[in-house]
């Protein structure tokens, strides 16, 4: 009997250790929200009780960045642990994944995009990278994606155990990795819900971003977004109830983040902090503690290696991200963080940026293009039309008109500590010449290191990397 007891004890110990090595991991993701728009990052104009309650139990990180300020390229970096401009997923909407799932076709260009003269395509380079959910699945996880597969390339069929479907959390007998995406905060809701009842009184909003004038249309737009955030929080509350009732909540790592910056002009699609810096927190399993620098510079490319590290799974050597939690957590913080932008819908462009803990350097390869690219999709927004009208009438202040400037500066340098909305360009200030030179050199080194494919015109790149060729 003693021998049987020892065998059983060893068996349960092994089970316990394996469970500890493979915890549940749940992602709550939202769309189009800059860091400064959320209450747990200091915004007093909106209360989100469900998220704020989770945030109180969580590690709130102060410097998480999307490598691209738009959804599909950003998501390609998340699922591969790679910079989009190193795997050919850097141009917005090279394909439509859900269309491919439904029809086997990559989708068609809309009328505005047909000027590009390039069909939809999927990058063979990206397809060659093993996605981290596929690796989790190979290591015993149930991988679940509730609704969003906008990755800008064809992902492997083995990535998700369940996709765009409901699952009964009580019946999942494996460790779970699940992604729940809430699109109520998407840019498109700025016009589709513009006439809905507002949760926030526009006249009572205390903080108007200094990139906008303080007028009724700006205030109404902010209130629409806050109302969308409030509805998102209600929906998140329903998810949390399900996670708790199934016993998953307490024992899970829960990630919360937005796919890139806010739904306004000079936010989404902008290389500035408003477009790339996002809210991010992690709730650890009950009783779990990790010593982590919450001010370190983090990028979406870090998600893939970090999740594998949390699960105790070896990280592919090709991944470019750095694990910041778990078994393989990096002992050293990155010195520089890189962000980029290229084509947005029908508008080609190329911008690269690098920041250190205080300063940010931006290089504009096509200064003749305004930062305010004429993206047809965005013109559906009342705020975009309003700002454009004020610009054309010369009714915007210098700060408010900065985004529309033509030509834009070839180089930009900002002191983020004192100028978080990047309005005072220091690139021509001799006092900062050495810092500009230092960051410019760091950017050059990174471009060479990752073999930046943005250097190749897209028509040529398509012929090189397309799965259609």
Image (cartoon, rainbow, N blue to C red):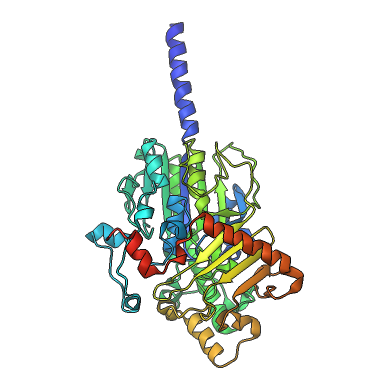
Name the residue at 39% across, 46% down.
130
The quadrant in which residue 176 appears is: top left
Residue at the outermost right position: 431
- Above or below, 249 relative to 165: above
The quadrant in which residue 36 appears is: bottom right
Query: Viewed as shown, does residue 19 lie left or right of 367?
Result: left
- Above or below, 124 relative to 200: above
The quadrant in which residue 12 appears is: top left
Name the residue at 52% across, 60% down.
67
Q: Nearer the viewer, residue 101 or 263?
A: 101
* Quadrant of the frame with the C terminus: bottom left
- Above or below, 379 relative to 442: below
Where residue 446 appears, as percent x and y from the top left, is: 56, 57
Q: Nearer the viewer, residue 368 or 245?
A: 368
Residue at the outermost bottom position: 393
- Above or below, 147 relative to 192: above
Residue at the outermost left position: 103
Query: Viewed as shown, does residue 389 lie left or right of 39?
Result: left
Where residue 372 appears, as percent x and y from the top left, is: 51, 79
Name the residue at 52% across, 74% down.
264
* Quadrant of the frame with the N terminus: top left
Name the residue at 55% across, 68% down.
271
């Amino acid at each position: 009997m003693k021998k049987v007891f020892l065998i059983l004890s060893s068996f349960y110990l092994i089970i316990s250790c394996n469970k500890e090595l493979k915890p549940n991991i749940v992602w709550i993701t939202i769309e189009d929200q800059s860091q400064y728009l959320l209450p747990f990052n200091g915004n007093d104009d909106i209360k989100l009780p469900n998220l704020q309650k989770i945030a109180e139990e969580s590690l709130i990180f102060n410097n998480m960045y999307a490598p691209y300020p738009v959804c599909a390229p950003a998501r390609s970096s998340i699922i591969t642990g790679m910079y989009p401009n190193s795997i050919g997923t850097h141009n917005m909407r090279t394909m439509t994944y859900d269309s491919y799932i439904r029809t086997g076709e990559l989708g068609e260009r809309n009328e505005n995009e047909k000027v590009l003269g390039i069909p939809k395509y999927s990058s063979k380079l990206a397809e060659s990278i093993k996605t981290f959910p596929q690796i989790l699945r190979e290591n015993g996880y149930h991988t679940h994606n509730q609704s969003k597969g906008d990755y800008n390339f064809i992902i492997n069929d083995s990535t998700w155990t369940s996709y765009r479907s409901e699952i009964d959390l009580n019946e999942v007998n494996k460790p779970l990795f699940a992604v729940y995406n809430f699109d109520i905060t998407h840019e498109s809701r700025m016009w589709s819900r513009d006439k809905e009842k507002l949760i926030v009184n526009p006249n009572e909003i205390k903080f108007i971003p200094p990139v906008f004038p303080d007028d009724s249309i700006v205030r109404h737009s902010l209130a629409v977004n806050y109302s969308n955030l409030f509805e998102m929080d209600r929906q998140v509350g329903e998810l949390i109830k399900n996670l708790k009732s199934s016993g998953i909540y307490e024992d899970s790592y829960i990630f919360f983040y937005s796919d890139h910056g806010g739904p306004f002009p000079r936010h989404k699609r902008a290389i500035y902090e408003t477009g790339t810096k996002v809210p991010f927190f992690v709730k650890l399993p009950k009783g779990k503690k990790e010593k982590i620098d919450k001010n370190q510079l983090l990028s979406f490319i870090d998600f893939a290696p970090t999740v594998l590290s949390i699960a105790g799974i070896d990280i592919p050597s090709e991944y470019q991200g750095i694990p910041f939690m778990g078994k393989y957590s990096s002992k050293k913080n990155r010195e520089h963080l890189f962000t980029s932008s290229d084509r947005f819908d029908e508008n080609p462009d190329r911008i690269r940026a690098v920041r250190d803990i205080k300063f940010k350097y931006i290089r504009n390869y096509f200064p003749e293009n305004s930062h305010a690219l004429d993206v047809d999709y965005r013109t559906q927004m009342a705020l975009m039309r309003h700002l454009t009208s004020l610009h054309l009438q010369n009714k915007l202040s210098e700060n408010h008109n900065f985004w529309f400037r033509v030509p834009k500066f070839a180089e930009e340098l900002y002191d983020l500590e004192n100028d978080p909305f990047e309005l005072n360009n220091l690139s021509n200030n001799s006092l900062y010449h050495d810092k500009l030179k230092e960051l410019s050199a760091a950017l050059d080194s990174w471009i060479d290191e990752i073999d930046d494919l943005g250097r190749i015109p897209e028509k040529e790149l398509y012929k090189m990397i397309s799965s259609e060729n």
